[in-house]
Image (spheres, rainbow, N blue to C red):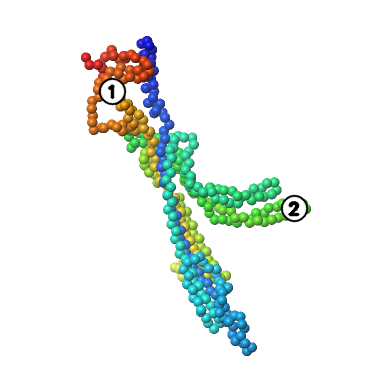
Amino acid sequence: MTPSNTFRAAAVLLLLLWIAPRAQAQEQKQVNVAVKIIEFQTSRGSESGLSAYFKQRNEPRPYGRVASGNGNISSAAYTFPSSVSTGLTVLFDNLSNHWGDFEVVLQALVDQNRAFILSQPKVMVPVAAAVPTVIKTTQDVPFENTVVIGSTANQVTAFRPTGVTLTVSALQVVDDDGNPSTTEDVFIQLKLQAEISEEGERITVALDSRALTSSGNLSSNTVGISVPEFVSRSVDTTVWVRNGQVLVMGGLYRNTVTNNTSQMPWLTQGENAAANVVSRVIPAVRDMKTPVTSVLGNKGNSESRRELVFLVKADVWRKSYTVADDFGFAEAAEGGQAADAEPEKEEEAPAKRPGDVISGVLKNLGVTSELGGQMPDATTGGISGEDR
């Protein structure tokens, strides 16, 4: 090989060595995003009720006593109101007076439930990507849907996802000093969209479908179907976070209060009227609750709260690369030291000629030439000329 070809190959090699770090610097940056989704649910409910059973006693007549209905309660056929859920039950049995026998059942129930759900997904998000990264924890809820084909309305089963959806996008990464070995001054711009969707109460919808009969007349059929309502809460924000910093995003909660009362007709209206009169006479008394409805009848109330909290941690992903270590290779993290290197021992590197570095690579290419042997003494990055 002629010296011109040798120098040309060396120039190409040096050009590749010069371009490689810059190509690596222009690689697609990625952000490692770790998310903790904490879902806290709590519910509390109480029910109380009074059930009474009464059977009239048959009094003796001049012509004798009627065989049936002697005042003994054989079954609880006369009930008001309906019983509450299973709970504490107190039964007063074998009570009697002049008119007959009766039984009284007192029932009470207090229920508390708590749930703590934690999921911890981890994703790799490209910086400035056109498509965001989506994290879903959902469940499909079936419901009845109406599809009209021609003049006929058909009922089909449709599904809608409910649960938690988090969309993450890394817009840009900024390094203040431009040094990849320091991460304290690296900031990441994130775009976060969190949404929680859940099934609410079911409502009854009347469907009026008209179709032609065999005689050509219209027949109307009213069908009642039950469909759920869906409740969603969402937050959309763009924030700057420091590399490795944890961002807390919350406030997505929902409170539900339900009150049910079962009692005698017109009892509630009379109680409300009496309470209004008392509040007008005594202004200091507001929202007075008389114990009538709590004693006569069944009363139930429930409270539930559901809260969602997101803990988001983002750090720039740095891949390991290979660096030359004398006659071997060592794996090191970007901007860090080699894994096999010992920073405590600092030994002076042996003096090398420029030709020793390049010729070792050229030998693998089949090029044998002493390059740099006649170069003057110089020291550049641990490579020195030949001592004279």
Please indicate whether residue 210 sits to the left or right of residue 332 in the image.
Answer: right
* SS class, disc 1: loop
**Count of marks, rendered view:** 2
Q: Which residue is mark 2?
A: 213
Q: Is residue 281 visible?
A: no
Query: Which residue is at a point 36% across and 30% down the rendered structure image?
Result: 321
Q: Residues within 10 Å of mark 1 (few under 14, many from 20)?
A: few
Question: Mark 1 — residue?
Answer: 381
Q: What kind of residue is marked 2?
A: Thr
* Front residue of this view, candidates 81 and 115: 115
Q: In the rendered structure, which amino acid carries the disc numbered 1?
A: Gly
Q: Earlier in the sequence, mark 1 or mark 2?
A: 2
Circle 2 SS class = loop
Q: Residue furthest top?
A: 2
Q: Is residue 361 left or right of residue 291?
A: left
Image point 44% across, 37% down: which residue? 125
Asked whether residue 104 appears in the rendered view, the answer is yes
